[in-house]
Image: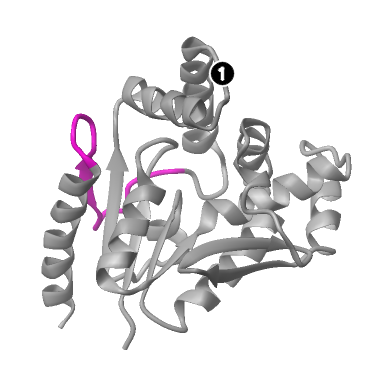
Amino acid sequence: MYYSIAIDGPAGAGKSTIAKCLAQKLGWVYIDTGAMYRAVALCCLENDVDISNETKVTNQINNISINIAYINKEQHIFLNNKDVSTDIRNQEVSLAASKVAVFHSVREALVKLQQDLASKGNVIMDGRDIGTVVLPNATVKIFLTASSYERATRRYKEQLEKGIIQDFEEVLKEINHRDELDYKREISPLKKADDAYGVDTTGYSIEQIVEEILILCKKGENNSD
């Protein structure tokens, strides 16, 4: 029997960072589902595909391959055999990912891939519909939140560390816009699963949140026995 931890939450809540830390502590495989949607978005942008046109996006996804590989214990995303792990992290791709993620054909294809990965070992998977759609029977479900101001502050600092200078108010506006897209989309909207633990990361360090989740995981494993 394999165990799984599903981590959902809005942009900037700390999902990826916390999931990576948990994976290292537990020795499990970390799967960044958002990176898969970003890869689809990147492919569309690079090929001048109208990301608001579901038919064109669907045609595109039917002709691409997305694979995950672990190099030096780090997850790398390959799009058509090209490592795009860095390319998918810019803001243009991020916003485009939210737009293509509303299409049923895109979600159907990627959810199937994500479930297949989870069937092969103990995994920690983060995204926006993991506990509700992708892994509805996950051992433990976590829903991370944080104030939009704090999430924008984190994103702003991340951008500065990468040498990207962006007005803070613009970053905050993008966070709020991303939330609106994620919470209000018709297909698999972002929401807390009924059996998920809610964890507010506002004002807490990564280490504190990881320790809190590890305690919740022990409770979840005991309940599943």
What is the x, y in percent for residue 58?
80, 54
Question: Measured along the vertical axis of the image, is residue 152 above or below residue 162?
Answer: above
Using the rendered view, name the quadrant where residue 132 is placed: bottom left
Question: Measured along the vertical axis of the image, is residue 160 above or below residue 81?
Answer: above
The residue shown at (35%, 42%) is 14
Depth order, front residue of 79/128: 79
- Mark 1 highlights which residue? 165
Quadrant location of the C terminus?
bottom left
**Mark 1 is on which residue type?**
Ile
Using the rendered view, name the quadrant where residue 46 is placed: top right
Q: Disc 1 on helix, strand or loop?
A: loop
Does the image show residue 54? no
The residue shown at (51%, 50%) is 188
User: Secondary structure of the magenta portion, mostly?
Assistant: loop
The residue range painted magenta reads 190-205
What is the x, y in percent for residue 45?
80, 40
> In screen coordinates, is 47 left or right of 125?
right
Depth order, front residue of 89/224: 89
Question: Measured along the vertical axis of the image, is residue 32 above or below residue 120?
Answer: above
